[in-house]
Image: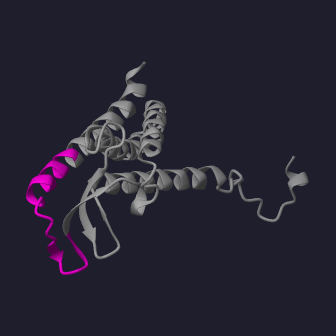
């Protein structure tokens, strides 16, 4: 691989690693600081910190199929890794790195957290009112998805733009056939 091709992949790996480390560090702090089950308000009732363990996916969906979510997570991480390796720009790599880091962060919980290997519950601690409780990996997933969507829109805009014909010198009222 040339340096041109490895640079975006290196960026994706560094962004993903930073996201995973930040996510896992924040979860370790939450497990210690919020172990008593209390809710710590940050912005009144709108946002706070509260420890929760999610056996499911977004908003607790699929909570009875944790092992399936683990398999889907493994497949997603593999696919994102391949996409990151094929990224051609730093922008794409950074977006995919965020997405990959978020997916790996939650997948670590699936493998390492109780109740057991590959059926672990994801540690959540960011309480959004009474709507749901999430974690930093979820934020990284959302940020990666937004970054990838923006990159797709920019690419679409660049490829679907109308092509402008090259400028021709003014004719000053002389018909084109007369100029030949």
Q: Is residue 103 above or below residue 36?
A: above
Depth order, front residue of 164/12: 12
| Residue pictured at 33% horizontal, 46% vertical | 106
Q: Is residue 123 left or right of residue 89?
A: left
Name, please, the residue furthest toward the right.
177
Q: Is residue 138 above or below residue 50?
A: above
Q: Is residue 81 above or below residue 161?
A: above
Which quadrant would residue 162 be assigned to in this image?
Answer: bottom right
Name, please, the residue furthest toward the bottom.
44
Q: Position of residue 109 (x, y in %)?
A: 29, 44
Q: Is residue 165 above or below residue 85?
A: below
Q: Is residue 148 magenta?
A: no
> In the rendered image, which quarter contains the N terminus?
top left
Q: Is residue 13 left or right of residue 61?
A: left
Q: Which color scheme did the rendering employ for the protein?
A: one colour
Depth order, front residue of 77/176: 77
Depth order, front residue of 36/122: 36
Q: Position of residue 114 (x, y in %)?
A: 26, 45
Depth order, front residue of 165/1: 1
Looking at the rendered structure, the number of numbered marks drawn on it comes to: 0
Q: Position of residue 25 (x, y in %)?
A: 16, 46
The magenta segment = 24-48
| Residue pictured at 15% horizontal, 56% vertical | 30
Which quadrant would residue 54 be assigned to in this image?
Answer: bottom left
Q: Is residue 25 magenta?
A: yes
Which quadrant would residue 136 be assigned to in this image?
Answer: bottom left
Q: Is residue 167 left or right of residue 66?
A: right
| Residue pictured at 9% horizontal, 53% vertical | 32
């Amino acid at each position: 691989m040339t340096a041109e091709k490895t640079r975006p992949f290196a960026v994706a790996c560094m962004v993903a690693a930073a996201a995973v480390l930040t996510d896992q560090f924040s979860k370790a702090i939450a497990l210690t600081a919020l172990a008593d089950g209390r809710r710590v308000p940050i912005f009144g009732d709108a946002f706070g910190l509260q420890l929760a363990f999610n056996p499911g996916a977004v908003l607790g969906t699929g909570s009875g199929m944790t092992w399936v979510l683990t398999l889907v997570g493994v497949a997603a991480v593999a696919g994102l890794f391949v996409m990151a390796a094929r990224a051609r720009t730093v922008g794409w790599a950074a977006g995919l790195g965020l997405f990959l880091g978020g997916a790996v962060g939650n997948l670590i919980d699936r493998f390492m957290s109780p109740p057991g290997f590959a059926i672990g519950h994801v540690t959540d601690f960011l309480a959004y009112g009474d709507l749901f409780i999430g974690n930093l990996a979820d934020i990284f997933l959302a940020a990666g998805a937004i970054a990838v969507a923006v990159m797709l829109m920019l690419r679409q805009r660049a490829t679907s733009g109308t092509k402008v014909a090259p400028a021709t010198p003014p004719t000053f009222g002389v018909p084109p056939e007369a100029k030949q």
